[in-house]
Amino acid sequence: MQTTTKPPFKLFGMSIVRDPDFYRQVLRIMLPVAAQQAINIGVNMMDTVMLGSLGEAQLSASSLANSFYNLFTILCMGIIGGCSVLAAQYWGAQDKVSARRTFSLALRLSLSLSLIFAIVTALFPAQIMRLYTPEPDVIAYGVRYLRITTFVYLFHGCAQVISFLMRSVQQPRLGLLVSCVSFAVNIFANWVFIFGKLGAPRMEIAGAALGTLIARMVEFAVTFTYVLVIDRKLGLRIPDLIRGPGREIFHNYRRLGLAVLFSDGILGLGINAMNMVLGRMGAAVVAANATCQVVDRLFTVVGTGIGNAASIVTGNTVGRGDTKKALEQGQTFYWLSCAFGAIAAVLVLLFGRMTVGAYSIDESTRVIANQMMLSYSVISFFQIMQNVMTKGVLRGGGDARFLLVADVLFLWIVSLPLGFVVGLVLHAPAWLTILCLRIDWAIKSFWCLHRLNSGKWIRRTERV
């Protein structure tokens, strides 16, 4: 007997899908992604706990040095985001050949980016640290950290791009497997090299960087062994990576994906500018913010998972040509983002101070962190909402150019100037400064709603 799909429920004129298959598909993507993010955050938390026991200078140095490394990671996410739009739509259209060519393009872009960052980090580590802080001891520790991370870019960039793109072809579990292995390797290597266990030299902050390098090398080996040897669903092999992507892939990447890379690049530079503002407010503020960010990310992992699911599900639906269903699903994702944003805000508020208590930091830093945690409870609500819309639905529908304008307009014209004035000119407390630096998330949460309901964000790949 043929079953019919229930029409969506309407709430304030927007759809809420009632099809159980939709939610099962979302969960299949969301849960592994959320678990993977939680594991990665667990690694970051252990890094900060271990380095926090060695003093604020080393904790601040690793946090600021990672700001530059995070710029690389965000640009990789831009490559992933742009290529994911293509891969998801090709997969939805059952075009495996074009999907494999998209992987080839993504790998070439990540290799180029990795080489640029490795050269800059190797030649200018001190200059990089001076962008974030004027404190000599923090700079010295940061240089030690950056010299080792020079070798991380190649392994992490390639593994991250490929494992994340596998989500676009309905294989999200690879990233979770890789993160589990990385978690175990990183924690063990950090313990050995930071504190000098099992006969290894005591390297302190350099040991944290070495632990990261070892973990990324293992990630690389696991990822490419699975994708090139074990996987049969996509069927990606070495000749596919060597072969050029082709004219059609380049055309569609320029049309739908290149703006994603620019958008994420602008976001990455903006986040670095925020860290420069906070870095000039003192090591205590940087250390406090580092602890708060770990807590915030821990309680917003579900939002990240929903955002990834929204991008992939939307891309698959648009690839099949069902624009009506894509709009209904997009509106449903908006309501999901509101619900989980509220849950995250409550969790940060309830458990934030308890988590700060686990860190070995000075009392003055602890006070700043507890104050900032209240701000992060507000930030987390809008963080999930805008993430699901910008990195999820609208990006999955191919609306990258609109998002590029949104990022430039609100981050660089509103958030950064406001945060600079409040934090460095008016010398306001850190909790108020961080609210000003993230006000763009609140604006985008509502601005993207209008774009969503217009339906103008749905853009399919083209044949050339």
Image (tube, rainbow, N blue to C red):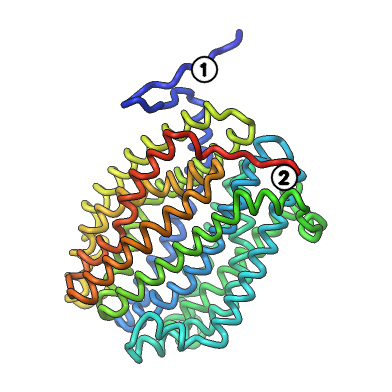
Residue at x 37%, y 77% (from the top left corner): 51
Q: Is 232 left or right of 285, judged from the image as shown? A: right
Q: Is residue 11 above or below residue 243?
A: above
Tag 1: residue type? Thr
Labelled disc at residue 136: none
- Kindly indicate the quadrant of the structure image that contains residue 131: bottom left
Spatial distance from mark 1 to mark 2, Cα to Cα?
29 Å
Q: Secondary structure at mark 1?
A: loop
Q: Are marks 1 and 2 in contact (CB under 8 Å)?
A: no
Residue at x 59%, y 67% (from the top left corner): 156
Q: Is residue 177 visible?
A: no
In percent of width and height, residue 140 lies at: 41, 90
Mark 1 nearby-residue class (10 Å; few <14, some 14–19, many ≥20): few
Residue at x 48%, y 37% (from the top left corner): 27
Q: Secondary structure at mark 2?
A: loop
Which residue does the numbered mark 1 point to in the structure image? Answer: 5
Tag 2: residue type? Leu
Mark 2 nearby-residue class (10 Å; few <14, some 14–19, many ≥20): some
In percent of width and height, residue 223 lies at: 65, 58
Labelled disc at residue 234: 2
Q: Earlier in the sequence, mark 1 or mark 2?
A: 1
In percent of width and height, residue 206 lies at: 47, 83
Q: Quadrant of the N terminus?
A: top right
In percent of width and height, residue 462 lies at: 69, 41
